[in-house]
Image (spheres, rainbow, N blue to C red):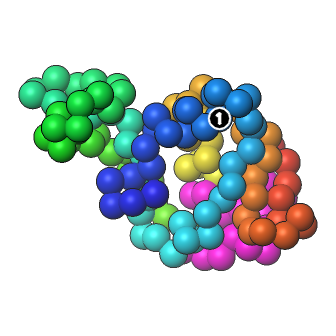
Amino acid sequence: VNHRGLLLDLARLGLGTEGARALAFVLSLDKLEKIGICVAYKLDGQIIESPPARSEDMLRAEPQIEWFPGWQRSTKNARSWNELPENAKRYLQRLAELIDCKIGLVSVGPKRSQTFFAN
């Protein structure tokens, strides 16, 4: 995640190619006021869904960001989907919808106890 938002294509690639169904929930998201997902790019007036192949085009492309409100509270003590902040659940549900992949596991930290089933 950077100032341009989570690159949706990277999420699709990571979850789609290996058949993974888990999201490592980066704790740094807890502190953000808003969180973005890059859902497309605008290049030469046209909306494209994937990043341009040529680096010079990528430099000119405008990311199209879908913004979500942050939750600004720690998730590290969550041990179930229901214990996550509502905004975190909305963000994860939208991400799953965009990458067309059901989220099976969510991790909120490095310990085994910090990984749980989604929904």
Q: Is residue 58 above or below residue 3?
A: above
Where residue 64 sits, quadrant-wise, is top left
In x, y percent, where is residue 8?
A: 46, 38
The residue that appears at 36% across and 27% down in the rendered structure is: 50
The residue that appears at 85% across and 48% down in the rendered structure is: 117
**Mark 1 surroundings: few (<14), some (14-19) or many (≥20) residues within 10 A:** many
The residue that appears at 50% across and 39% down in the rendered structure is: 10
Seen from the viewer's position, the closer of residues 23 and 91 is: 23
Q: Residue furthest front?
A: 55
Q: Is residue 27 above or below residue 106?
A: below
Q: Amino acid at mark 1?
A: Leu
Quick one: SS at disc 1?
Answer: helix
Q: Is residue 31 above or below residue 117?
A: below
Residue 94 part of the magenta segment:
no
Where residue 95 sits, quadrant-wise, is top right
State which region is magenta: 72-88
Where residue 99 sits, quadrant-wise, is top right
Res. 79 in view: no
Q: Quadrant of the C terminus?
A: top right
Residue 80 part of the magenta segment:
yes
Residue under label 1: 15
Res. 10 in view: yes
In x, y percent, where is residue 37?
A: 42, 46
Q: Residue furthest left?
A: 44
In x, y percent, where is residue 66?
A: 37, 44
The residue that appears at 64% across and 52% down in the rendered structure is: 89
Q: Is residue 91 left or right of residue 56?
A: right
Seen from the viewer's position, the closer of residues 65 and 19 is: 19
Q: Is residue 45 left or right of residue 61?
A: left
Q: Is residue 89 left or right of residue 69?
A: right
In x, y percent, where is residue 42?
A: 20, 32
Q: Main secondary structure of the magenta part?
A: loop
